[in-house]
Image (spheres, rainbow, N blue to C red):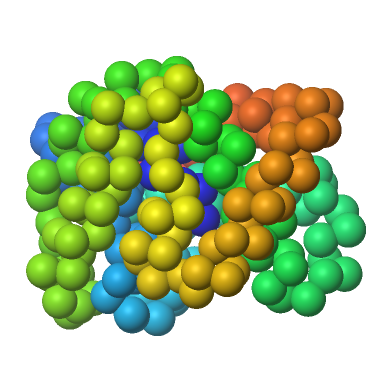
Amino acid sequence: MALAATHIRLALDMADRYPVNHFPQFISGTIYPDSRWLTGINRNLTHGDRFLQKDFARSDFTYGWHVHCLVDHVQARLYKTLFPDAEAMDRQQRWILLSAAKVIQDRHDLDKFDLQGGIALLNYAEAPAGEDIQLVRAFNRIIRETYKDRDKNRLPDYYNLWTGVGLDPIVAAKVMDQIQKLLSDTSLVTKIESTYAKIVGSPAFLQNKAQ
């Protein structure tokens, strides 16, 4: 998954491609799929292929949800090119590497739009898979608290974000270590940050445009 700042920035950039009427529903929809970290539901219930289809989105909440899944889909393809050796890694090593890259992307994105205005919209919740809506709201609250008053000079505490949604602290620490390794390669950092424009320009968003 991309992290919240990246998802919110992308959703706001994509909003004019969808008939959005209520931004709290739209932004909450674009954060919703990753609430599975707290609710414990199967990933296929929030990220399945059906959510990539243009006929899935029919409300502001599902427009945001649809954008989230398209972003994850396109980003995954870009990362396969950017990290060709990742396929040979075991599942956890690969997840740690790609998650570290997504944090670097998120750190870049959070200063490129009105982040505080974006998280302020995160005040709505739905539980379309029948999960506990209080846990969905709790996830939204964690995102708001993580990014409140943060910018490039006062970065979010990503370790607390990961552990706060249930990631093993040992794995979270490995992600933080991997971030530092990636940051030492300025050329790679630039390539990671440049994937944002490639996601925005992906034909997937035109081919799957909601009506």
Residue at 50% in and 74% down: 168
Q: Is residue 165 above or below residue 205?
A: below
Q: Is residue 131 left or right of residue 151?
A: left
Q: Is residue 169 left or right of residue 17?
A: right
* Residue 199 visible in this rendered orientation of the protein: no
Residue in the image at 65% along x and 29% along y: 193
Query: Residue, x 44% and y 76% (percent of image)?
Result: 44
Residue 194 quadrant: top right
Compared with 135, 70 (above or below) is: above
**194, 168: nearer the viewer:** 168
Count of labels in the image: 0
Indicate left or right for 206 with 67 as reference: right
Above or below, 131 against 24 in this view is below
Residue 60 horizontal/vertical position (percent): 19, 44
Q: Is residue 7 above or below residue 13?
A: below
Foreground of the two, 169 or 124: 169
- Can residue 113 be seen here? yes
Q: Which x, y percent locates residue 37?
A: 37, 70
Coordinates of residue 209 in the picture (x, y in percent): 41, 40
Look at the image and tell me in which quarter the C terminus lies.
Answer: top left
User: Who's the residue at 68% across and 52% down the image?
Assistant: 177
Q: Residue 107's spot in the image, x, y percent?
A: 52, 32
Give left or right: position of 188 versus 51.
right
